Amino acid sequence: MDWGCFGHAQIGRARRTLNAFVLVLSWSRQIFLQFYLDQQMENFLRGHVAAFDAWQGLPKVILYDNLKSAVLERRGDAIRFNPTLLALAAHYRFEPRPVAIARGNEKGRVERSIQFIRSSFFAGRSWHDIDDLNAQARAWCQGVSAERRCPEDTRLTVREAFTQEQPHLLPLPDNPFPTEECVAVSAGKTPYVRFDLNDYSIPHIHVQRPLQVLASLTDVRICHGDDVIAQHPRSYGKEEQIEDPAHIETLVGWKSNARHHRGQDRLVQSVPSSIELLIQAGQRGHNLSTIVSALQRQLDDYGAGELEVAIQDALQRGAPHPNAVGIALERRREGRRQPPPIAVAVSPKARDLVVRHASLARYDQLSDTAETLIPDPEGEINDQ
C-alpha cells in the first residue's frame, strides 16, 4: 500500500491536495485505486475498506512504507505501530508489515503501479469532480489495468490471475470497519458549527453547547450526546454556509416571538396598567400582538406617565383597546394645548431599555453632609 500525490483540485474557494490511495495484490498485480482530498487517517482507513469490498476479500499481509498512518516510531527492529492501524488489522485479521528503511525494492510493486497509473490513467484525463474521477478510476481498474499481462505469469492477464487469486484471500467480516471522522465542536452565539473549513447550521436551541461532528465522505451529522440534531451533505469548498431551511425558519420565528416578548416586557414594566388592559383585551378576543405594538408606539410618543393615565381612563370606560387609549391621550394633550407628538427614530436596542427613576433622597443626604464640612484657612476640613 502507498499514497501517490497528483497535484491539487480547486473546489470553490478551496485548493485541496489530490491523493491516490493505491493497494496492489503482489501475485496477480490487481490494482485498487481511489482518490481522496487528503491523506488523513480517516481516508487511509476508507481506502482499505473500499479495496477489501471491491476484491471481496483481503490478503494475509499488507506491506507499508514508514508513513505516520502506519508507523509512529521505529528504532532498528523495534516498531511502534499506529494504534488505529492495529485496530483495523485486528478487525480484518491481517498482518501489517512495514518495509525496511532504504529498501525500495520491497515496495517496488506499488511504486511501479503508481507510475503506471500516472502514465496510463491520469495523464491528459479530464474530470468534473472527485466522484467522477473515482468512477473513471474504477472503470480503468476493471478495464485497461486488468487487461495487461500478469508479470508473474505472462500467459495470464491480470484479470485472469486475480480470478485464481481471489479464492485464497481472507473472507470479509460481517461488518466494515468504522471510518467516520469524529470531531468535537462548539457553536458560539450563532447557530453554526465549523467543520473542515465550512459552517453547518444547527437548531438555535443548541448554541453555546459542546457538540460532536460525525462525517463521512458524503454526509455531516452533528450530534448532542446520542441525539443527531442536524444532518447535511458534506462540502469540500471553503468558507461556505451549508444550511437546513428548517433551521432558518425556526430561528426567524423564534426571533420574531422574542421581539414581541421584549416589547411586551418593556410595556408592562413601564406602564403597569397595561397588564389589565391586555387581560381584558384577550378575553374579548382581540389580537394581543397588534395591541402591544400599538401601545408601544403610544409609549414612545407620549411617555410612560401619560400612557398610564390614558389606559386607566380607557379601562374605566370599559374599552380595553389602543383606540380608546389614543382618544384619552389626545384629549389630555389638547387640554394642555401641546403640539402633536413627532415620531423620532430610535434604535431598537435603546427603545427596549427600561429606565427606572432613582430616588433623589440620596442627593439630600449628600447636601446635608456637605453643609457640616467647613474648610479652615489651612485647607483642612473641620467637622462641625
Image (cartoon, helix red, strand yellow):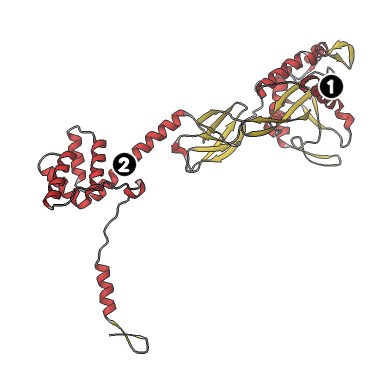
Rendered residue at 40%/34% (across/down): 252
Q: Amino acid at mark 2?
A: His
Relative to 91, residue 171 above or below: above
Quadrant of the rendered image containing residue 37: top right
Quadrant of the rendered image containing residue 255: top left
Q: Amino acid at mark 1?
A: Ser
Q: Quadrant of the C terminus?
A: bottom left
Which of the numbered marks, if any, corresponds to residue 286? none
Find residue 40 and report its horizontal and vertical position in percent.
69, 34
What residue is pinned by disc 1? 26
Find residue 246 and report its horizontal and vertical position in percent.
44, 29
Q: Earlier in the sequence, mark 2 or mark 1?
A: 1
Find residue 153 and report its horizontal and vertical position in percent.
89, 14
Rendered residue at 25%/76% (across/down): 368
- Mark 1 lies on a secondary structure that is loop
Relative to 110, residue 346 above or below: below
- Comparing 13 with 196, the one in front is 13
Q: Is residue 197 left or right of residue 91?
A: left
**Label 2–label 1 contact, CB within 8 A:** no
Quadrant of the rendered image containing residue 61: top right
* Gap between marks 2 and 1 measured at Cα: 71 Å
- Comparing 304 with 297, the one in front is 297
Rendered residue at 84%/14% (across/down): 148
Counting other residues with Cα less than 10 Å from the Cα at mark 1, is it few (<14), some (14-19), or many (20 or more)? Answer: some
What residue is pinned by disc 2? 261
Taking the image as drawn, is residue 321 in sight? no
Find residue 117 and report its horizontal and vertical position in percent.
79, 22
Tally the marks.
Answer: 2
Q: Is residue 109 left or right of residue 211?
A: right
